[in-house]
Image: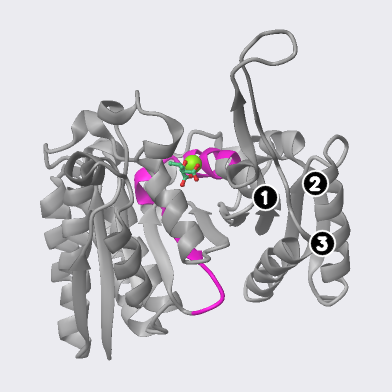
């Protein structure tokens, strides 16, 4: 199989972790006889430094011309003083929007070898933790009308963002969640704030409508504040959580942390076609950038997700996941997941160890 992959290394630890993912991807390509062409493109802070804008036109064009996008991380303190439209984060939002990637899939799973990294008590975790957050990614307050009003009626500065959703935007993400639950433990929890927000009341109405098409899936609604609490009280109750953009942003950080290893969690952003964008859910970690210390596993697992979801290469994808599990079982750890009796390795050593086992 021949595929073109747009590669955005980005900022901070982005280049280091993406290099390891490419190493592993290339090993899988050679072993299984595929040809992947990697097209490096600029986005984020490094793009601001070189071109003055976070998402150059050539980057969007290259992403649209590729079969998938692999991204490290963007942003850092160097660009924090910049205004909304020229921040590195704008690059992420722009690619999501330009590629129509409305469904962000964020799994939270406890890795057997890392069970002791989980910050929750054993009795809370019970029989493990394996949930997926399906986050709507190109609607809501992120993309609704927003404005800074220099002087409002009281003569003060004010600002607003609009959380707006249409029925069709809600319906398509709902279907992603129900379809996914069908392949898992058949349970969907839809998260909203329907006791306060109109957009949430519409969300709930559409979800109930879609649920009727999936009679074998257990469906329930949950308010977002309660969900935040339930995630630490009894995370085992969740299978698939579906929610709007900003609630999903917040809850997915919380859900990743209860696995104890945010450095391990991949994500995919998908639209209607097979092209997706794949990235670790952690950020650019500027404090450890350039020190060959970062954990590349979330990015390596993101590449594995790409093989499965965009290229339909399940066997190759599993080969990468198995290699990761083997290396963890052997006790190799980067600093963020290090524990007593384990062997500390660098970012590139971790990449080598995983690649060797493909
Ligand atoms: C994420 C990030 C982004 C988001 C930021 C960097 C724009 O937090 O992917 O979760 O809010 O979507
Ligand atoms: Mg986030």
Please provide percent x and percent y for residue 8. Answer: 26, 57
Q: Which residues are magenta?
A: 250-273
Look at the image and tell me in which quarter the N terminus lies. bottom left
Residue at image location 79% in from the left, 62% down from the top: 167
User: Does 60 appear above or below 91?
Assistant: below
Q: Can you identify the residue that label 2 sits on?
A: 199
Depth check, mark 2 against mark 1: the one in front is 2
Is the residue marked by circle 2 packed among few (<14), some (14-19), or many (20+) residues within 10 Å? Answer: many
SS under mark 1: loop
Distance from the alpha carbon under mark 3 to that under mark 2: 12 Å
Q: Is residue 300 magenta?
A: no
Please provide percent x and percent y for residue 217. Answer: 79, 70
- The disc at residue 13 is none
SS under mark 3: helix
The one nearer the camera, 53 or 69, is: 53
**How many numbered marks appear?**
3
- Label 1 with label 3: CB-CB less than 8 Å: no
Left or right: 103 as drawn, with respect to 325: right
Residue at image location 29% in from the left, 32% down from the top: 76
Q: Is residue 256 magenta?
A: yes
SS under mark 2: helix
Q: Earlier in the sequence, mark 1 or mark 3?
A: 3
Residue 283 sits in which quadrant? Answer: top left
- Label 2 with label 1: CB-CB less than 8 Å: yes
Q: Can you identify the residue that label 1 sits on?
A: 244
User: Does 124 appear above or below 172?
Assistant: above
Left or right: 48 as drawn, with respect to 89: left
Is the residue marked by circle 1 packed among few (<14), some (14-19), or many (20+) residues within 10 Å? Answer: many
Distance from the alpha carbon under mark 2 to that under mark 1: 10 Å
């Amino acid at each position: 199989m021949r595929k073109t992959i747009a590669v955005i290394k980005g900022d901070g630890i982005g280049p280091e972790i993406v290099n390891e993912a490419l190493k592993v991807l290339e090993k899988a390509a050679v072993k299984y006889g595929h040809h992947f062409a990697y097209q490096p493109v600029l986005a984020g802070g490094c793009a601001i430094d070189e071109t003055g804008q976070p998402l150059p036109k050539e980057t969007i064009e290259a992403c649209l011309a590729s079969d998938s996008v692999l991204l490290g991380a963007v942003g850092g303190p160097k660009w924090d003083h910049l205004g909304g439209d020229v921040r590195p984060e704008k690059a992420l939002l722009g690619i999501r929007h330009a590629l129509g990637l409305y469904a962000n899939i964020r799994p939270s799973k406890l890795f057997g070898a890392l069970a002791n990294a989980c910050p929750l008590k054993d009795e809370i975790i019970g029989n493990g933790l394996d949930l997926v957050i399906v986050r709507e990614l190109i609607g809501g307050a992120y993309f609704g009308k927003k404005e800074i009003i220099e002087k409002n009626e009281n003569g003060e500065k004010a600002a607003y963002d609009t959380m707006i959703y249409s029925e069709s935007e809600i319906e398509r993400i709902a279907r992603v969640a129900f379809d996914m639950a069908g392949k898992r433990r058949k349970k969907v929890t839809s998260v909203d704030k329907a006791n306060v927000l109109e957009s949430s009341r519409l969300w709930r109405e559409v979800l109930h409508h879609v649920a009727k098409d999936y009679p074998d899936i257990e469906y329930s609604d949950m308010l977002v504040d309660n969900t935040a609490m339930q995630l630490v009280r009894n995370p085992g109750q969740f299978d698939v959580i579906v929610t709007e953009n900003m609630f999903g942003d917040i809850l997915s950080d919380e859900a990743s942390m209860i696995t104890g290893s945010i450095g391990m969690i991949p994500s995919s952003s998908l639209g209607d076609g097979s092209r997706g964008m794949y990235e670790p859910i952690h950020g650019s970690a500027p404090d450890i950038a350039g020190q060959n210390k970062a954990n590349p596993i979330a990015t390596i697992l993101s590449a594995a997700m790409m093989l499965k979801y965009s290229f339909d290469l399940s066997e190759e994808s599993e080969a990468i996941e198995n290699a990761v599990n083997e290396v963890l079982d052997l006790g190799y750890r980067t600093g963020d997941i290090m524990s007593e009796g384990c062997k500390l390795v660098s970012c590139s050593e971790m990449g080598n160890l995983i690649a060797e086992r493909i």
